[in-house]
Image (cartoon, helix red, strand yellow):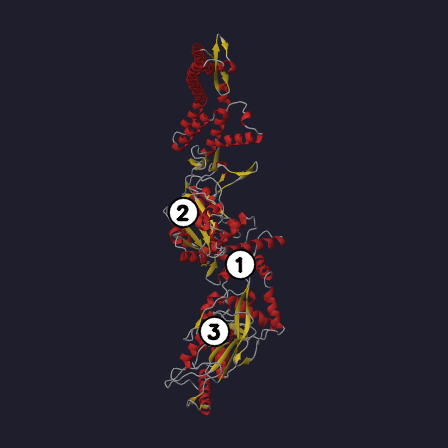
Amino acid sequence: MTRGNRLEAEQIFKHCEPDIFELETTEEIAPLAGIIGQERAVRAINFGLKINRYGYNIFLTGLTGTGKLSYARSVIQERANEQTVPDDWLYVYNFRHPGEPIALSLPAGMGSVFIRDIHNLLNELKEEIPKAFNTEEYERQKGTILKIFQETRSNLMEQLNRVAQEKGFVLKRTSTGFLSVPLKDGEELNEEEFNQLEKGEREEVEKKSTEVQLKALEIVRKIQNEEKAMKDKFRELEQKTGLHAAGHLIDELKEKYQDFNRVIHYLDALQEDVLENLNDFRDEDDDKQFPFPWLKKQAQAEASTRYTVNLLIDNSELTGAPIVIESNPTYYNLIGRVEYENRFGTMTTDFSMIKGGALHRANGGYLILQVKDLLLNFQSWEVLKRVLKTKEIRMETIGEQYALLTMATLKPEPIPLEVKVILIGNPLWYHLLYRFDEDFRKLFKIKADFDSVMGRSLENMTKMAEFITTHCQRENLKHFDRTGVARVVEYSSRLAEHQEKLTTCFNDIVEILFEADAWAGIDNNDYITAAHVDQAIMEKNYRSDKYEKKLLEMVEQGQILLDFEGAKEGQVNGLSIIDLGDYSFARPSRITASTYMGRRGIVNIERESKMSGRIHDKGVLIISGYLGQKFAREKPLTLSASLCFEQSYEGVDGDSASSAELYALLSSLAEIPLKQGLAVSGSINQKGEIQPVGGITRKIEGFFAACKLKGLTGDQGVIIPHQNTVNLMLDAEVVEAVRQVTFHIYAVKTVEEGLEILSGLPPGKRDEDGKYPEGSFFSRVEKRLEELAESLRRQQGEDQDPEKGRPNDREPGCSNQGLTHT
């Protein structure tokens, strides 16, 4: 059986023959078009980009480095080039509601044209309006109006004076109106002379004075009405003159933008405002209106800003739909902001300080975001959901929403939104959002799941060569010869941990391409060969394997107790993986088992010391199930046993050592030594079948390195699950050792096969009487269990409980539950 289980060198590494590539170097082939080995994700993305319905945004999920962003950018770019360029967006002043700027849209490129047109219009208005008011015709019409008013006022004053004279008074103008002074014999009476008049005469004078005053009030009222009429005529003249100067200019713009109703409405409002504020365009000395120069500057700045245009989004340089990749998706970077500036000691803002965000730039196209960055920024996820649900971009400050800041600000008109959002994240983010956010499944209905591996077919290997060509051209690397390409393929299978698969974590491949190029440059080679790829891989590992070397040094010095030859009872070499993030390696460990009389069952020392994970605990419980179905079908199973990872000072998890723990336990029960030159990895089920585990390549290489330090004897090796044979991509040194039969790898399907390899004894099968063959491994186990049970019964008979009349079979701190996990 041992020979039949042993793997040959050809089975533990799948070589890639350079001759399968129809090339000498990668410069002979075209770059890769598309992506390799992601058919499922490609179909999902293509469908997601074609369907234009509510909620059909895309979530790209998969391991980091599988090319999600690169592929999304390339495929979206192809589709965006076929789409029309979206409109430009502008904000203009709202003359009726200044705090609510108006949003206008114009075809791509016309936004900047509209700004130029408005700028030219203002310059022409500043030139034409003063000219219109400096003409002789304007002065003549203005003088005519003034002359008519003056003549009317003179006539009214003459009429008043005649009335006063008829009544015997003369009128004098004062600051409060007219004063009527009585006359006698043509002479004005003073107050003393007036008082000397007879009473009746005084009363008559006072009566006439009242009549004169009433008439004066009537005349003054008429003069005021005439003055008001004059001002109205002046205003009408100014409006007419201003319209004559500005009307045709604005009409030209209205004709140019006649297809855009909102622009026409804005131009009408602008014309009305210009006519209401003609003084802003006239060269008149208005210093008297402003006691301080800075007030005049502020007023002039506000007046000029009112007629400007804020080009929020300019798509004039686009050739298709926009693609925006926002690397810092903060709240304001997504929806834009209203900025403030310090003007003369006061924080002020206006519509010209409205700044667009990523959603504005991506409107009509595509927005690509990393979901981790989105979720880590306060309120970014909530605002993204809100705009996707409402289909409009409404600018609001966070302070407004949470009442953290109360201050007057602008409320820009919301902009309609039409965008396809592509989120990129690992599977954990996807499942968390799908599970706990009810809006997520409504808004992101397309899942594009990127696989971490692909088949090692000739087609995919050829595409891998094209992938190498792409990076050689893009990054100006030396080209690879066919041996270098073949070695990259082999390294890709090693990363995939499968002889029939290639990794799709292309970041790891690209690192090797760069580093191999550097080593080829150091060797002054024109092309990158397999040797340079090997050098790159070796140096990359060397930079990170410090702790592995330290551990092996401790093994060599005997600080970590391991046996690599001979045989011992209840002791097996197990293999575990230490993962440092950027580097992982195997650690050989001594697994021991002790069995003794009692009812405690199997004690997992790691669990008792709270150093065991749940999966490891499950593996130990499965061992209990296996022993029960194997040796306790007709009689109870009574034993106490303990299992331990010796010299383990960190947590242990996973069930890949459950077969090794079972072998150690059976060895202790049968009192049969196991070969110490072998290490074991593999999990078991309750039926005794060996199940595959992860990291098998690194485990074998780790034990081989330890054996090499102590010296290869020709009897050392590793027992692995037979299903893991296809996962072996061992390094050249291990492959050569297997070829030279100085190191062995055994693939087993059952516990019995592994037990025979370790002990050299057949495990045995029950005969018709239900007995194991004499001398077989299992017969020794069964016999030992019977001895332990008999010894326990005798002990219980001697220790009869005098109070209750039954055996006192409880051990301190233990429950009488048979074979259970404590």
Q: Which mark is residue 487?
A: 1
Amino acid at dot 1: Arg
Coordinates of residue 794 in the picture (x, y in percent): 45, 91
Q: Residues within 10 Å of mark 2 (few under 14, many from 20)?
A: some
- Three-letter amino acid code at the position of disc 3: Ser
x%, y% of residue 162?
44, 10
Question: Whole-Å distance between the Cαs marked 1 and 2?
Answer: 48 Å
As drawn, is 438 to the left or to the right of 515? left
Camera-side residue of 21 and 813 = 813
Locate residue 270: give its quadrant: top left
**Dot 1 and dot 2 residues touching (CB under 8 Å):** no
Label 2 with label 3: CB-CB less than 8 Å: no
The residue at 42%/33% (across/down) is: 96
Distance, label 2 to label 3, CA atoms, is: 51 Å
| Tag 3 secondary structure | helix
Residue topped by disc 2: 388
> Which residue is depicted at the point 46% across and 92% down?
798
Q: Nearer the viewer, mark 2 or mark 3?
A: 2
What residue is shown at x 57% (from left), y 56% (from top)?
Answer: 529
Q: Is disc 1 placed on a helix, strand or loop?
A: helix
